[in-house]
Amino acid sequence: MLSVTSISKSYGPRLLFNDVNFSIVKGDRVALVGANGVGKSTLFNIILGLEEADAGTIALNRGTTLGFLPQEAPAASSQTILGLAVGITEEHSKLRQEMLDLEAAGQKASVQYSATSRRYKELEGYELEPKAQNILKKLAFREEDFRRPASEMSGGWVMRAYIARLLVMAPDLLILDEPTNHLDLETLLWFQNYLLDYPGAIILISHDRSFLNAVLGNQKKGLVMELRCNRLHRYRGNYDDYCLQRAARLEQQWAAYRNQQEQIASLQRFVDRFGSKATKAAQAQSKIKQIERMVKIEAPESDEPKIHIQFPQPESSGQRVITLSGVHHSYGALEVYRGINLEVERGERIVLIGPNGAGKSTLLKLLAGVLPVQQGDRSLGLKVSCGYYSQNRIDMLTPEYTVLEEAMDIPYPPLEVTVRTILGSFLFRGDDVFKKVSVLSGGEKSRLSLVKLLLNPPNLLLMDEPTIHLDMDSCEVLMDALEQYRGTLIFISHDVTFIRRLAQKVLHIHSGRITTYAGGYDYYLKKNQTLNERDGIVAGQGLVNAQPENSKEKNLLESELSARELKRIEIQRKTALSNRRRELRMLVNKLEREISKLEMQHAELVAQLQDPSLYEDRAAVEDLNQKLISNREESEARNLEWEKAATELSEMEEQ
């Protein structure tokens, strides 16, 4: 399928890699790994023909198709989300847009439309649209999003549309550069499972260790290629296998190198001692020739020393850090929480988990004070300082500052050399520290915000997906820093390694309820008999209550219930579920009727506003506009309410 032969690449005097050789066949799963800046993305660009190699060749079998997902989305176009997902080739996009333009002009019966439609059909365009719609739904798009221009949506959602486009295209070779950066965990798991059954080959770069392990699978298909010290090294298996094999290989190389060096030193000592003696001269010359004839073993390339950074520690808070009492929160008609209670104590390390849309980020924002409490009470404990890390923190940066100036712009900055070391560990190396904040990418701004937070930490730290945009080395530095951290930590993450290292308590959120697990992530998995470590993060209903050992539910479960009692409880449970399903069906039907009525009202209002004579009466125009705004707001509220009810109904029917 793909053969890479003797590829080399340099930028001026700097050699990225030399004599790179590998081949990929159908069904291969390949991860390209290596430290930041070793040339992983450059190698991708050479394969794609976006850059030229200094030497070597790239050979692609005739008819092989390539699909590429870059780290960042291309500039958003005027295409709709569905149009972007369906436009797998330039011709598909052009034909589809031409048909839409002709339809808008009322020329659907024209000869031109007929010819365009016929060509679109020949390219299987009509078969692609249902496939694209299904994939877009799996990537968390709503049907009403399909017709929205991509330019109206955030970069993360545009990236999801490009993922859909790739999956619709189904190329022979998928090339993915950090594909998980813009996916929530539920969508990531769907994408991961989709790739497991993908018929083509996949080569990817990712910092998500669990994702790599899952996609690479086993030693038959999985291959890890490491770019290191200008060379490419290959290891069969998944990422964990690579770590073990690499450590063993380096140890073997060091042992062989040391043995040879000891042998050379022994021979050289003989030469140094007896070389000047006539009786030993012949033997000394023999030793010299023996050294010269040896095939020298090079010293193994050393790992970069692991960075150990001492981060500042916050002032200690009181024992009770934060409390939510009877807190309600809604977005319009969509009720997320109703009367929740939560108390967090000093030093706790809590991870929030649950399905997409369950309210994890909302709870984190309520704790942070970013969202006001609509009903109930949020109270901070004694001497509590709260810090919230999310993508919104980039708005707190000063555009005209350099990276170094921004990092130093904290109340008690450490020495500049310390700050530069920390910046380097988060991928700001060399002259990067003199870049202006205004020219940084979104990912770079996020990393800089993270550095500032760690340099001046509060004693209550709230973090939403902190590992996004970090490579594996930077993730290690962050985990080390948070392990040192003596404050209280509450976070959301889809990185299982990160969760296992840091979480000592799990809060599972679903349908406005919080279930507490007084233990780490493995304890949570054990309590729920969840076999897949990642599925557990987005698990929905049916989870056992794992409150501390004296909980009422635990005592009930451990008591000896009679068969009759167990049967009675099961009947009650099924009756309650049946009643709830019936309520949800009635609610969904009612909301659909209301939404349909609102849509008809919207069409009537728009038609009235299109009447030229209306604009002679300014008051009437203003009245109609106000009605249109009210109609739109009510429609949005009803749609949100319908989406929540329909989702819950769908989950219950699946169970």
Image (cartoon, rainbow, N blue to C red):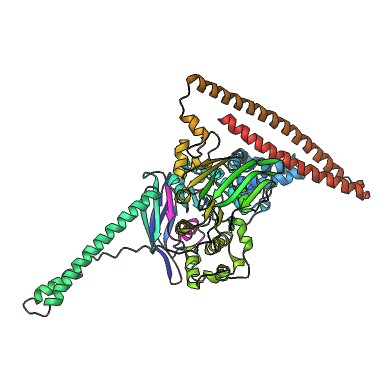
Task: Give the position of the C terminus as an image quadrant.
Answer: top right
Q: Position of residue 394 (x, y in %)?
A: 61, 60
Please determine whether, in this image, residue 38 is positioned above or below residue 178: below
Residue 37 located within the stretch drawn in magenta: yes
Q: Residue at x 69, y 41 (%)?
A: 334
Of residue 186 and residue 170, the one placed in the foreground of this image is: 186
**Hey, which residue is sitting farthest top in the picture?**
564
Q: Position of residue 555 (x, y in %)?
A: 48, 32
**Hey, which residue is sitting farthest right in the picture?**
616
Q: Position of residue 136 (x, y in %)?
A: 60, 42
Q: Read off the magenta span.
A: 29-51
Residue 644 located within the stretch drawn in magenta: no
Q: Residue at x 48, y 20 (%)?
A: 563
Position of residue 95 in the picture relative to residue 528 (left or right): right
Please determine whether, in this image, residue 91 is positioned above or below residue 419: above
Q: Position of residue 175 (x, y in %)?
A: 49, 51
Position of residue 178 in the picture relative to residue 233 (left or right): right
Say whether residue 106 is visible. no
